[in-house]
Amino acid sequence: MRMNDSESPPPAWEVVDEALARIRACRGMPEFIDNACEQVLVGCEAESVALGRIVDGAWVSWLRTGQLEPLHSCGALPSHPIPVDDASSWEQRVVRSRQTIGRAIAPAEGGRRVLVAAVMAGDEALGLLHVVGGAHLVPQIVQSCADTLGSVLALILVRQRAEEQSYVLTSLRSGLGELPERPIELLAASGTSPARASSALPPDPLGQWHDLTARQQEVLGLMLLGLSNPEIAERLVLSVPTVKSHVRAVLRASGAVNRSDAIARFARTRD
């Protein structure tokens, strides 16, 4: 049921507005990661805050701040991705209704409760916001925070996609611009036919593409876009050591001596 805040003191909207303004000022994912939960904590006067991403229909633990124990108590930190359809009826109802819903989680400890709101971008659910605190928590404030998080996160994701597309187009233009020179260089160097010249080239790294797992192929795609290991980890919701393991698998498959060599081989073959 929707929480009744009629007995709560009037919220300090000046503090809330300042916190939301700081969230709106985030221009990229690193700023968002550093500030989002902290500002929600301040604006809501909460004990702890968790923001979980919804990726490919699964709810994944992502950002958190404040005390961890209350977040574990209310199930806000799933240990592994949970399909939204398999989440608790509580979380499912939040996503369906798009309302802030709350419940008591420790009535014997001063009436601690948790409010949950869906972080939306239009009709798409981007995440779930869990805010834990005392009886003074105000659903309207939590909902305002969730709405702001949704709009800012959606904008950042759009910018990321635009930057990726721009990078790919630039790489394609560069590769196409070099194509006329390549056969000339091969013929000038060997004096043989194009067929013989091509046989002297190193093995096609894309021939090893199918030896990679689906996740390793995703990592390779982001490597080609110029993302670092931490950026790939954030994008795919993985740990950095896991990403490094996938990168090593890509190096083995391509026969490259290092990351730059692997990127150059796959990028050259793509072009």
Image (spheres, rainbow, N blue to C red):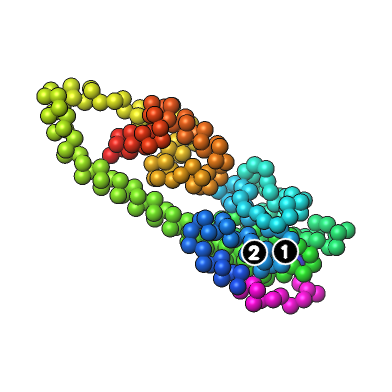
| Residue where numbered disc 1 is placed | 46
Q: Looking at the image, which residue is at 53% across and 47% down?
A: 234
Q: Kindly identify the amino acid type of the residue bearing the numbered disc 2.
A: Val
Q: Quick check: is 14 in the magenta stretch?
A: yes
What element does badge 1 sit on? loop
Tell whether label 1 touches label 2 (CB within 8 Å): yes
Question: In this image, 36 relative to 201: left or right?
Answer: right
| Residue where numbered disc 2 is placed | 40
Q: Earlier in the sequence, mark 2 or mark 1?
A: 2
Q: Quick check: is 41 in the magenta stretch?
A: no
Label 2, label 1: how far apart the Cα atoms are: 8 Å
Report the magenta residues as a range: 5-17
Dot 2 alpha-carbon crowd within 10 angstroms: few under 14, some 14 to 19, many 20 or more: many
Identify the image quadrant of the C terminus. Answer: top left
Q: Is residue 173 visible?
A: yes
Dot 1 alpha-carbon crowd within 10 angstroms: few under 14, some 14 to 19, many 20 or more: many
Dominant secondary structure of the residues highlighted in magenta in the image: loop
Residue 95's x, y, as percent? 63, 57
Q: Residue 176's quadrant in the figure?
A: top left
What element does badge 2 sit on? helix
Identify the image quadrant of the N terminus. Answer: bottom right
Question: Is 110 located above or below residue 76 in the figure?
Answer: below
